[in-house]
Image: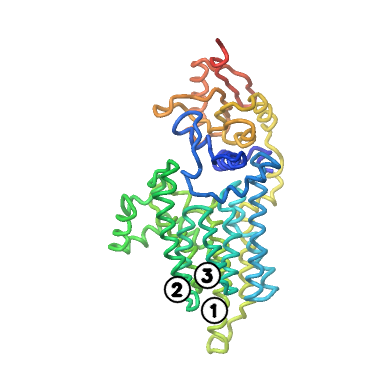
């Protein structure tokens, strides 16, 4: 619905749409949005941005419907499918009643809601694979669990950190120590291989997402700082306090039960990657918005179940702990807590009548899009970019810079909503005026939407 009412965005929906379309055409996962910051009209492979070959599994769906709608539906299906192996996992541990309630709690959890609200990300695969991984561990199937961990590495390179954390946790489980050591060593090896060999081969800069400059200029310096001044970790984890609120909202609905399980080391490792970041560029990592917490929510639920079982076993029949409720009751309390916060996150919009109607400017947006020819390179306003991504080469509308002076032959501007690459609406209006001075002609203008085109390629 958000797509058709112009409430999605180019980041990251169009990026993934363009990449998966490349796979669907039996080519590389190229994105014009990513490439535009290097050279106008160029395409950059997503494998050089993040190592996510798992996206290729979505390519056949584009043969049925070529467009970002496919990604939105596929993500919903993947998130939902994860409830099945999770139900099996909980039933084996706590019984069928707890399995149903906790499966519902997972589906309604705020990390899933916020990820869906962000439209699409490769983390959509993580809850399903994670649920299978923990269920196979619970079933005692070592090789199948190791295979699931290997599949997880194909989702995104930082899932290697998750695998390293899980491997460290399994070292505390006697019958899983060898498998845990294999995960730990394999995760470290894969992270180094992906970061310093595979992705650079596709044009990546290994330091592109290095947001840890307070710790050092590279991983070696950062590790030295962390080991020599461990008290700095506490300060960074609490600054800004957004980090503390996110941690509280992740663990409190689960009654902090994940902390009683060695499985918690897997999501904690990914949380450490985010919360130890110090640079403003990582601000999106720290909060509750976007997709980041979808990568750990299933692991936290599985660790909570394991933690409940461990707590019950440790306290059963012992004084003064005999007053503690059964593991099933603890699961029910966890479910109620998880469901209670639903209205405060993205799913809360479903209860607001004002969320459903299309914006009053939708008709103008649709007419503006109709003026853009098929197949052209177009700088598009953020909200309308996804809606023309299937038939044009969309890049984000952004002002001319010294590094990138060229402009696309078609511009779909919005002078009423502030755009990500402009400081203000006034700056957007100034850019439109500059384009007119450069000779761009107006093809459409209504209700803040303006379509401009460069006539020079078609003249003479």
Of marks 3 and 2, the one in the foreground: 2
Upstream in sequence: badge 3 or badge 2: 2
What residue is pinned by disc 1?
310
Residue 147's quadrant in the figure? Answer: bottom right
Residue located at (64% from left, 41% from top): 68
Quadrant for the N terminus in the image: top right
Give above or below for 216 relative to 335.
above
Marks 3 and 2, Cα distance to the nearest angstrom? 17 Å
Comparing 211 with 67, the one in front is 67
Of marks 2 and 1, the one in the foreground: 2
Residue located at (59% from left, 69% from top): 136
Upstream in sequence: badge 1 or badge 3: 3
Upstream in sequence: badge 2 or badge 1: 2
Q: Which mark is residue 171?
A: 2
Element at badge 3?
Answer: helix
Element at badge 1?
Answer: helix
Residue located at (59% from left, 40% from top): 26
Pinpoint residue 12: horizontal percent, then vertical percent.
55, 43
What residue is pinned by disc 3?
258
User: On the rendered structure, is 58 left or right of 149?
Assistant: right
Give above or below for 282 relative to 25.
below
């Amino acid at each position: 619905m958000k797509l058709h009412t112009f409430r999605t965005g180019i980041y990251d929906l169009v990026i993934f749409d363009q990449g998966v379309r490349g796979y669907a055409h039996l080519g590389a996962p190229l994105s014009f949005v990513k490439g535009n910051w290097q050279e106008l009209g160029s395409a950059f492979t997503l494998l050089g941005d993040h190592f996510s070959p798992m996206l290729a599994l979505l390519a056949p769906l584009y043969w049925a419907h070529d467009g970002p709608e496919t990604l939105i539906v596929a993500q919903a299906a993947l998130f939902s499918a994860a409830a099945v192996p999770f139900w099996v996992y909980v039933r084996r541990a706590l019984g069928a009643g707890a399995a149903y309630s906790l499966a519902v709690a997972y589906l309604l959890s705020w990390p899933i809601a916020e990820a869906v609200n962000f439209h699409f990300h490769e983390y959509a695969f993580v809850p399903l694979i994670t649920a299978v991984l923990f269920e196979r561990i619970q079933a005692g199937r070592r090789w199948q669990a190791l295979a699931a961990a290997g599949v997880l590495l194909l989702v995104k390179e930082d899932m290697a950190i998750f695998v390293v954390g899980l491997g460290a946790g399994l070292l505390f489980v006697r019958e899983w120590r060898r498998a845990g050591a294999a995960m730990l060593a394999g995760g470290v090896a894969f992270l180094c291989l992906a970061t310093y060999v595979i992705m650079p081969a596709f044009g990546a800069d290994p330091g592109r997402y290095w947001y840890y400059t307070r710790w050092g200029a590279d991983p070696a310096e950062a590790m030295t700082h962390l080991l020599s001044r461990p008290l700095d970790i506490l300060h960074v984890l609490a600054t800004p306090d957004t980090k503390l609120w996110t941690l509280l909202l992740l663990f409190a609905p689960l009654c902090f039960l994940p902390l009683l399980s060695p499985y918690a080391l897997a999501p904690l490792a990914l949380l450490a990657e985010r919360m130890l970041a110090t640079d403003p560029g990582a601000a999106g990592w720290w909060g509750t918005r976007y997709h980041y917490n979808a990568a750990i929510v299933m692991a936290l639920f599985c660790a909570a179940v394991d933690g409940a079982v461990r707590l019950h076993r440790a306290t059963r029949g012992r004084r003064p702990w005999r007053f503690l409720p059964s593991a099933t009751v603890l699961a029910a309390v966890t479910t109620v807590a998880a469901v209670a916060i639903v209205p405060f996150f993205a799913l809360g919009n479903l209860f607001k009548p004002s969320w459903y109607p299309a914006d009053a400017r939708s008709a103008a947006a649709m007419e503006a899009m109709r003026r853009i020819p098929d197949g052209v390179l177009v700088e598009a306003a953020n909200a309308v970019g996804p809606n023309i991504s299937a038939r044009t080469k969309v890049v984000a509308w952004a002002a001319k810079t010294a590094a990138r002076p060229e402009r696309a032959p078609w511009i779909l501007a919005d002078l009423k909503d502030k755009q990500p690459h402009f400081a203000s609406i006034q700056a957007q209006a100034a850019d439109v005026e500059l384009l007119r001075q450069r000779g761009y002609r107006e093809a459409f203008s209504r209700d803040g939407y303006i379509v401009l085109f460069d006539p020079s390629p078609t003249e003479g």
